[in-house]
Amino acid sequence: MPDSTSPTRATLDKRRADVAAMFDGVAQRYDLMNSLMTAGLVDKWRRDVVEAIDPQPGQRILDLAAGTGSSSLPLAEAGAQVFPTDMSLGMLGVGKKKHPEMHFTAGDALHLPYADNSFDTVTISYGLRNVEQTEDALRELLRVTRPGGQLLVCEFSTPTNPVFRTAYDGVLKGVIPLLSKGFSSNSPAYSYLAESIKAWPAQRPLADLISTAGWTAVGWQNLTGGIVALHRAWKPAPTL
């Protein structure tokens, strides 16, 4: 997708049309920006997600907010049947060019195009905080997961060390906007992304929200001092 002459960014209201248009505008350089913004740590975090999911041959996995498919590829390479899904047609278009062997699907987190109990695992990386109604999205993910299936959310979070947290705030306020001006096709979008990270719930409140949505045995693992957290939960099995 060519660079936009009218850069689009969403607001913290996270209206779906605005979010989709914003990601359409950053799709071409999205993977590059992820690597630059995280100093390459995104690759380690992706490996941590794969390890937590432990994909098996034949396992059905929904990768929501899959974007260009970078998070879906290692799951597919492990033999799982992966369904990379995103509401940004721009991101999906880039993904199809990069990974033509995968079947990308357009889908809204609040109205997934899948039947009840379709997946063994559902996962979303760096996308849940961009959904207009977080709890409704978690309930929709619950709907399409089989009883006993797992949820894995990888999302930016709150560093646990106060000194580290202060330094991290400086990165969000200064470094990311600077990088976006030099490398992104839609610099205003990265101002939103930094704001959305700062406004996002910390580890415990997010775990509570996941529980409220109906998931059980919710826990989390901090990565890189809590810059990112992996939240994991399961869909309750039916009682006899």
Image (cartoon, helix red, strand yellow):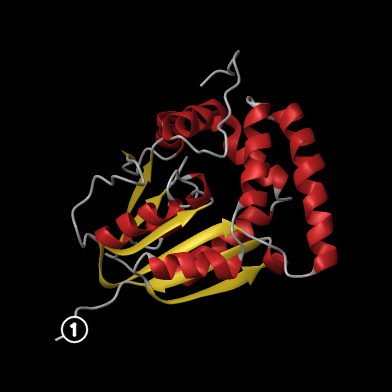
Say whether residue 54 is visible.
no
Tell me which residue sits at (78%, 42%) in the image: 173
Q: Is residue 90 above or below residue 60?
A: above
User: Which residue is label 1 attached to?
Assistant: 239
Where 163 falls versus 198 (above or below)?
A: below
Up-down: is 194 above or below 134?
above
Which residue is located at x 41 percent, y 72 percent? 233
- Residue drawn 59% across the image and 40% down it: 31
Q: Position of residue 2 (x, y in %)?
A: 55, 18
Residue type highlighted by circle 1: Thr
Using residue 165 as the reference point, say whether residue 231 is left or right of it.
left
In the rendered view of the protein, which quadrant contains the C terminus? Answer: bottom left
Asked whether residue 19 appears in the rendered view, the answer is: yes
Residue toward you, 201 or 52 = 201
Secondary structure of the residue carrying tag 1 is loop
Give the farthest residue toward the bottom: 240
